[in-house]
Amino acid sequence: MKPFTYHAPTTVDEAVAMLDQYQASVAVVAGGTDVVIELNERSKTPEHVVNINKLNELRYVKEEDGLVKIGALTTFDDLENNAYVQEKLPALWDTAVHVGSPQIRSLGTIGGNVVNASVAGDSPTTFMTYGASVVLKSAQGERVMTIEDFNKGPGNCAIRSDELMTEVRFPALSADEAVGYFKIGKRKSLAIVVLAVAVYVKRTADNKVDDCRVILGAVSKHPMRAPELEALLKGRPLTREALDETLPEFTAAIQAAIPTRPSVVYKREGVRGAARRCFDQVLSQLGLA
Amino acid sequence: MEQITIHFNLNGKDVTVSADPNKRLVDFLREDMGMTSVKEGCGEGECGACTIIYNGKAVTSCLMLAVQCGYCTPGMVLSAKALLDKKPDATNEEIKRAMSGNLCRCTGYAKIIEAVETARDVKGGGKA
């Protein structure tokens, strides 16, 4: 590791002031599961390191003003053990429990996962499916942008070096909304996402798809919305048969997205199973299974 | 790093030595035992230059750690402790999950999982 000046702020205001001062050459460490590797391998050589893991004010899950708000420093282990997440956000819970390993989940934060913007990141896919936005704070003030706009990938997002990501937020789900998520990895633990599918559905009074979002993870440079699949699902009755009819189009979407990538061979097959499991979860959450 | 004492038979002679657990077998044989006839080629197990006979089988010594057992143990023990401190009556499934972030290159994990189950039964699980 190249030597740097270490800072450990204890409040968000203090952290933001530091980023403002050192923005020319600074790295923010939250859980450290990505950045410490980059520092160790010298792929990042900042003059200043701001370790924000003492900012306990950024560790929360709450519902407020119709929004679910999750502090950036909330770890995957926090999500796994949070009663609200377990009960109301099963797709996020499912995402959290499949990140890395127990040790990595104890350290890794949702803020770090989103800002790191890996093509194979676990949580950005899910957050995008919930229609989430990120809150960015700096000495200039606060701005909120959707994860869709924020994530430029790979390893690139719209955060400025004087900004601190403080929160992920998205509309709380009503009884007529559900999200399913399924990750394919090469093994059960310590597995990077090779393909993730996440589906959001809002139903009509007569149990048809009113609105939906379909997001494919680890396919494009960043979690990718599939508008053609969303169009196909809208208006469809929420039954296993009607939903399953769309599965061949998931294969077509993967084929179109990555026609020349070697992994297309298994991703275009695996996507149907992953999508079917998302449908299972959606139907079950809506009480239609 | 703390050294670990190992016993083995080297070309017909029983030996007992201290070895660094973070050393590959090829380096241990060359540097610690002076066996420079063991050559490192690719260092990835592809070329066969570092082949030795280990318990009757030809193996590439660049892929083996000199200390074959115990490297993963401290990490395994701590994952098990973190679990049993929080859940003294953890189920077998919870044990498997808690240990899923620790890799072992020697065993098939069964003995390790059984050891944690034993620790639970002896220490927690109703018995004070």
Image: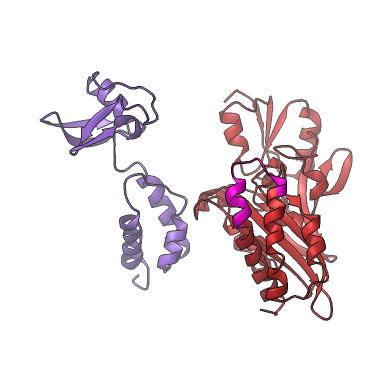
Q: Is residue A269 magenta?
A: yes
Residue A152 location, quadrant: top right
Chain drawn in purple = B
Q: Residue at x 68, y 26 (%)?
A: A46
Q: Residue at x 70, y 56 (%)?
A: A126
Horizontal side of residue A197 vs B37, given as left or right: right
Q: Residue at x 81, y 35 (%)?
A: A160
Report how many numbered discs are placed on residues in the image. Answer: 0
Percent x, y of residue B63: 35, 34
Q: Residue at x 62, y 44 (%)?
A: A31
Quick one: A232 or B73, which is closer to the camera?
A232
Asked whether residue B87 is in view, the answer is: yes
Horizontal side of residue A129 vs B23, given as left or right: right
Percent x, y of residue A246: 72, 65
Which residue in the rendered view is the most extreme toward the left?
A: B12
Which residue in the rendered view is the most extreme toward the right?
A: A140
Percent x, y of residue B87: 46, 65
Q: Colour of chain A?
A: red
Q: Please give the range of residues in magenta.
A: A256-270
Q: Is residue A259 magenta?
A: yes
Q: Is residue A197 above or below residue A288?
A: above
**Majority secondary structure of the magenta segment?**
helix
| Viewport quadrant of the N terminus of chain A | top right
| Viewport quadrant of the C terminus of chain A | bottom right
Percent x, y of residue B31: 28, 21
Residue A83 location, quadrant: bottom right
Horizontal side of residue B57 vs A72, given as left or right: left
